[in-house]
Amino acid sequence: MATKLLLAKAHVEGIRHFEVYRREGGYAAVEKALKMEPAAIVEEVKKSGLRGRGGAGFPSGMKWSFLAKPEGVPRYLVCNADESEPGTFKDRYLMEFLPHLLIEGLIVSSFALGSNRTYIYIRGEYAWIVGILEQAIAEAKQNGFLGKNILGSGFDCEIYVQRGAGAYICGEETALIESLEGKRGNPRIKPPFPAIKGLWDCPTVVNNVETLAAVVPILNMGGEEYAKIGVGRSTGTKLISACGNINKPGVYEIEMTLSVEEFIYSDEYCGGIPNGKRLKACIPGGSSVPILPANLLLKTAKGETRLMNYESLSDGGFATGSMLGSGGFIVLDEDQCVVKNTLTLARFYRHESCGQCSPCREGTGWMEKILTKIENGKGAISDIDLLWDIQRKIEGNTICPLGDAAAWPVAAAIRHFRDEFEWHVNNPELCQTQNYGLAHYADPIHVPA
Amino acid sequence: MVKFSEDKLKEVQSMIDRYPEGKQKSALIPLLHLAQEDFGGWLSAETMDYVGSLLGIEPIEVYEVATFYSMYNLKPVGKHVFEVCHTGPCMLKGSDDIIAYIKTKLDIKVGETTADGLFTLKTVECLGACGYAPMMQMGIDYREHLTEAKVDEIIAACRNKQ
Ligand SMILES: Cc1cc2nc3c(=O)[nH]c(=O)nc-3n(C[C@H](O)[C@H](O)[C@H](O)COP(=O)(O)O)c2cc1C
Ligand code: SF4
Ligand code: FES
């Protein structure tokens, strides 16, 4: 059995409630933390090797150490629960089933960073989870783990839940801060970074739900022990939300030594592809990361087994690799059309662009239009080149990374599946009733008898 | 006239109290949710102006925000709003068929409301339920693993509530 640091107690009856969570050993990390120096907690997180679970994978301890601490200015911790990257639904699971784990992580982290007022910014559509979190907060408060002078330590902390209102861009940390200030979610130009000038111009740390929950096991077991789980710079465990054409979609906690092949085919995880179909492609880390054909997914270009971790998934760079990203694992079987899939993602990014930068605002619109043409059998070969050209002009030329996130899926689809695009152009009628199928993309390992 | 009840006004105050002194504008997004729920499922100019007055901010500051976020309805909607997700992962699991089925069943296009004012159909982008696809949001609830039979049931249940 794989080590479970976050979800081990997810199925304990009543774990959503304080008494049960506490009986199962909950809030021990808070008791431990409040007896430590805040700087020592930051040190433990550094030692753990924890990397941000929101998508970028930035070392969390290092991020915390950048937080400015000017005299007399409040500092804020904001929990990013915006979770809107297509394919990603792990934070939802954590908050729904283990709300106290997040609250515990938030108390420890607030103490480490000196935040007396901590916000959870949750996507507006997760409305029912707001109630679950507020209940957990109220219970923690009744039991002296929140509010004034927590456990007699002299530390005061309140946690508030703030609901967004439908905007993927508010997951980007500076857009999130704008939104929390009651404005449109337009990302800010960096620098200054939030660690210097964030919420209401005060030093601010924004961290993902899963990152903050992971602080609990790190404190309990110590950073060094945590770092022993996993491999290389992929320490600890990772939540993966798996969806698409698999037998067992859902949220899994994995050790980052697991192979992609085992994750897809083993009954402990995705349980293989339904209806005896073959694996065609996969987007392993949320809609923004490059799609890979099955052959490059299971083995790297060098022929090594690909593992579910930061380094292995990005092995080969964008030429032959992808990214772990947010852990949104999207599987496509042989009946799926890569052009159509790319089109829905292009539409998503066009819809979600905040419109501040012209390459992103205009480029995402054009990519959607051209992909619609190709998908409907009205495209030309030159359109594929135009699409390539547009995505290149977006990448790296925008205020926030949404531009890149929109460009990469299109680039990867053309890079690896160009003949499927060409087939649409060359078979304008056939492509309306039939799919291109597997061609040479199929998983070479699992060939049905 | 648009006005919250005394109870709701208390809720408004508790929302404002979550932020430091002078930062009450931060309550705008939660307040607009509250107003939309309370005043007929959408935000009229009158409603938005009222919300602005509660926070002591200019009407334009409210309009800017209300037009940015997709969950705010800027025109009236049906009693039951079906917001069906059609992003990649849901598409892989047949969301297009579900949308087509609802269209035929209710005889409306995406973005329209039935003549009796009961149903509005919308398509939305990923709602974080990709593993339970196809799905839609109805009010604050998620309806997941949709099938044609399930859609029939949901529509019948909505009609029965009348
Ligand atoms: C367009 C866009 C959307 C994002 N959405 C999310 C999100 O929903 N949740 C999240 O935690 N991080 C999201 N991020 C990353 C955040 O900007 C930020 O890096 C993250 O919250 C930092 O937390 P971490 O270091 O704990 O991962 C997004 C970034 C971009 C550019
Ligand atoms: S890249 Fe797109 S989403 Fe990001 S700031 Fe520019 S226009 Fe807005
Ligand atoms: S794609 Fe539909 S919920 Fe994520």
Image: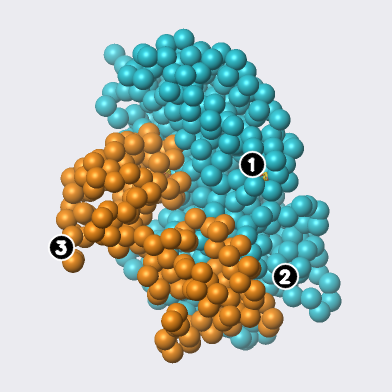
Chain colours: A cyan, B orange
Assign a secondary structure to mark 1.
helix
Amino acid type at mark 3: Asn
Q: Which residue is mark 1?
A: A361
Left or right: residue A343 compared with residue B17: left
Q: Which mark is residue A200?
A: 2
Q: Which residue is mark 3?
A: B160
Q: Secondary structure at mark 3?
A: helix
- Identify whether A123 is placed above or below A436: below
Give me the C-alpha separation between circle 2 and circle 3.
49 Å
Q: Residue at x 34, y 68 (%)?
A: A14
- The reply to the same-chain question for discs 2 and 3 is no
Between A448 and B29, the one lying in front of the other is B29
Q: Position of residue B157 (x, y in %)?
A: 18, 59
Q: Residue furthest right?
A: A71
Q: Do callouts 2 and 1 point to residues on the same chain? A: yes
Q: Residue at x 41, y 29 (%)?
A: A332
Dot 1 amino acid type:
Arg
Would residue A409 appear left or right of B128 to someone viewing this image? right
